[in-house]
Image (cartoon, rainbow, N blue to C red):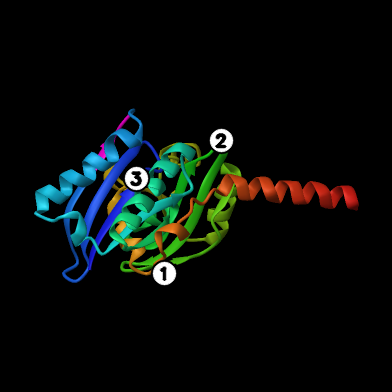
Amino acid sequence: MLLLGIDTSGKTASAALFDSDSEVFLAESTLYTQKTHSQVIMPMVKEILAQTGKAVPDIDVIAVADGPGSYTGLRIGVAAVKAMGFALDCKCCGVSTLEALAYNNIAFKGTICSVMKARGDLVYTCSYKSDGYALEPLCDEQIISRDELAQFLAFNGTEALLCGDGAADFFMNYRSPMLIIAPPMGRLQNACGVCLAALSKELVTADELEVSYLQKVKAEKDLQDKLAKQEG
């Protein structure tokens, strides 16, 4: 199966082409850019296809980071994948940005904690147990304060590898022998992680693909809590 992965959820724009039968990444391109992702992601896809001698119709599945992350970036990535899915009549797959970040560091055996900057002191986060080949979530994806995350990791009681664009700040502010920070190449979004995460996901049609916003989930929860207090 030839799998195309795309990630436009953060500062990096990334595309990767993965042959799942041989377990080989045929090509990968990542750019840390100030440009709008719509300017760079499709030329990036065309470039890696050309470099590998593949054509667009050769793609069997297209996977994309569907959130959390930049609202604009996520919409651009998901819209691009939906358009390609419709044009090629192929299956698609939405992958959590947090899970894809963890898969970029899948060789680490133990707890991997993805930390992405949200707003203010809040972070998007999820922790996973890695056996070096696959991930098992240890909690739900959340948007919480950095203090709450530090408390969660302390109670977890094991070393944790931090990755994501919020990892460095968290590591510096909550120094602990139990915290390890991923190297720069494993810290930010990369479409290779999207491809690996997609292998265990259910495939959907292009029209079923949607963006996942944790911010909205938290806003809805806050409203429910407020209403519950008023009723009480």
Report the residue marked by disc 2. Answer: 119
Amino acid type assigned to the residue bearing label 2 in the image? Arg
Q: Residue at x 56, y 42 (%)?
A: 146
State the extent of the magenta-drawn residues as a range: 29-33
* Mark 2 touches mark 3? (CB < 8 Å): no
Question: Is 210 located above or below residue 41 in the figure?
Answer: below
Whole-Å distance between the Cαs marked 1 and 3? 26 Å
The image quarter in which residue 73 lies:
top left
Q: Residue at x 49, y 47 (%)?
A: 68
* Mark 1 touches mark 3? (CB < 8 Å): no
Q: Residue at x 54, y 56 (%)?
A: 141
Q: Is residue 195 visible?
A: yes
Kindly report which numbered mark, 1 or 2, lies closer to the viewer in this rendering: 1
The N terminus, quarter of image: bottom left
Q: Which of 61/11 is in front?
A: 61
What numbered label is drawn on residue 187? 3
* 61 left or right, relative to 49: right
Whole-Å distance between the Cαs marked 1 and 2? 31 Å
Q: Which of 140/28 is in front?
A: 28
Tell me if mark 2 has few (under 14), some (14-19) or many (20+) residues whose alpha carbon lies within 10 angstroms of its own: few
**Residue 35: x, y in percent?**
33, 29
Whole-Å distance between the Cαs marked 2 and 3? 19 Å
Residue 31: within the magenta? yes
- Which element type, helix, strand or loop, lies under badge 2? loop
**Could you tell which of marks 2 and 3 lies nearer the N-terminus?**
2
Report the residue marked by disc 1. Answer: 202
Q: Is residue 159 visible?
A: no
